[in-house]
Image (cartoon, rainbow, N blue to C red):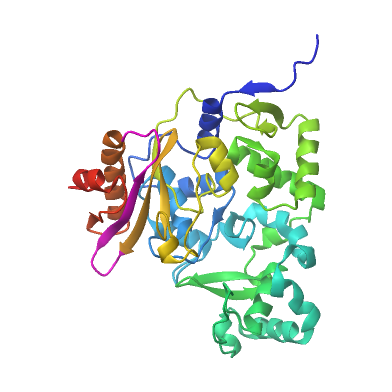
Amino acid sequence: MADRGPIRVSLASARRIALAAQGFGRPRAGKPVSSRQIEALVKRLGILQIDSVNVFSRSHYMPIFSRLGPYDRGLLDRMAGHGTGRIDRRLIEYWAHEASLIPLELHPLMRWRMADIDREAWGSIGRINREQPELVERIRALVASNGPIRARDTGAVRPPPTPGEMWNWHPEKVALEYLFFSGQVAAARRVNFERHYDLAERVVPAAVAATPTPTVQDAQRQLVRVAAQALGIATEPDLGDYFRLPRADSKARVAELVGAGELLAVRVEGWDAPAYVWPAARRPRAVNARALLTPFDSLIWFRPRTERLFGFRYRIEIYTPAAKRVHGYYVLPFLLGEQLVARVDLKSDRQNGVLLVQGAFIEPGADPTLVAPELAAELALTADWLGLGRVVVVNRGDLAAQLATAVG
């Protein structure tokens, strides 16, 4: 029989596979969410991206809420070592996508990146050990004797702002980041989002540290497996971006898994690039989801994939001058059913106990009479979870008036 080539998958089916793989479509918990449920979800996703912006909510809290509903954020804090309370470490921080929380068992899979810091790290972090090795050694000794320490505990003074620089780091902070990226130190805690650095052997559990180091190829293959399970259906760039693999390595690892039958080649309607499906991925006939998505949610963080799956063009505008922003400073897409149907610019006014909707916009083809009440209900649930007493909608955007009416 002649080979008919890859299986063809409709775009609607691809969306359902992707949403189900990311944990959407199941009813939210009707009782308090447990730490076991949170841990299981993070293992399913493989990663929670961390970001410093807190105008609405720290981004790593949101993917769990988006999928499981309201939960005690203190449970995640204890698992990640955030705050000043007891640590029940089940997650650890590393540059796995961007700054990220990952399950402990994935930490050894990052050792190739730690060892290849000259290629993997960026800018000053990659250079500092070549240019100032004595500084790096001094900072490492300081961590060894005084850790956990913060960047400010090195005695350095933050330099004046430099135009065009996203992070205004002093050399001692850069040295700490080099040690963190290379795996010599780890994040023992974050308190008020400030990282506390300590020697890795005092942070990484002994059983994890004792895990044999896999080869680069074996580690990357496993990372692609994790990505494939978390995405369900994806192109090679989608898979490689999940853990930010070098493109040549991503191509090689995907090809190896296809050759071994661990990934199945498919053609998705409307996609130019070949796609691959995880054989055990759920293929639901429908997905009934409702969620606000942080800009750093793994469902949408790779913008080309978001456009292919949902026809939704999304650009974060935090670094865009206010006068040039189209939708707002911190804009969250709204998922309803199987589509991204709206976007809202959100701010938590904690002083006044208000979840402020600074802009609300409907997507082409979506029905605002259906979207507005569902979005209002999700915003009310979100506000309650964040400890905010009410939702206030500013009259900006083509959905704002109907949303304000629905909020009441």
Spot occupied by residue 149 in the image (x, y as percentages of width and height): 58, 81
The residue segment tinted magenta is: 349-367
- Give residue 310's position: percent from left, percent from top: 50, 37
**Which sits in the foreground, 393 or 3?**
393
- Is residue 207 within the magenta segment? no
Where does residue 244 sit, x and y in percent of width and height?
A: 68, 53
**Residue in the image at 28% along x and 58% along y:** 355
In-front residue for pair 41/53: 53
Residue pictured at 50% horizontal, 50% vertical = 297
Is residue 176 visible to us here? yes
* Residue 145, above or below 359: below
| Quadrant position of residue 142 | bottom right
Q: In this image, 71 relative to 404: left or right?
A: right
Question: Where residue 33 sits: x, y (%)?
Answer: 39, 47
Q: Going by the image, does 375 lie left or right of 174?
A: left
**Quarter placement of the N terminus:** top right
Above-or-below relation of 260 to 110: above
* Residue drawn where x is 56% and y is 80% of the image: 150
Residue 352 among magenta residues:
yes
Q: Residue furthest front?
A: 323
Residue occupying the point 27% across, 43% down: 377
Examine the rendering and report whether any part of residue 34 can be seen. Answer: no
Total marks in image: 0
258 horizontally vs 350: left or right: right
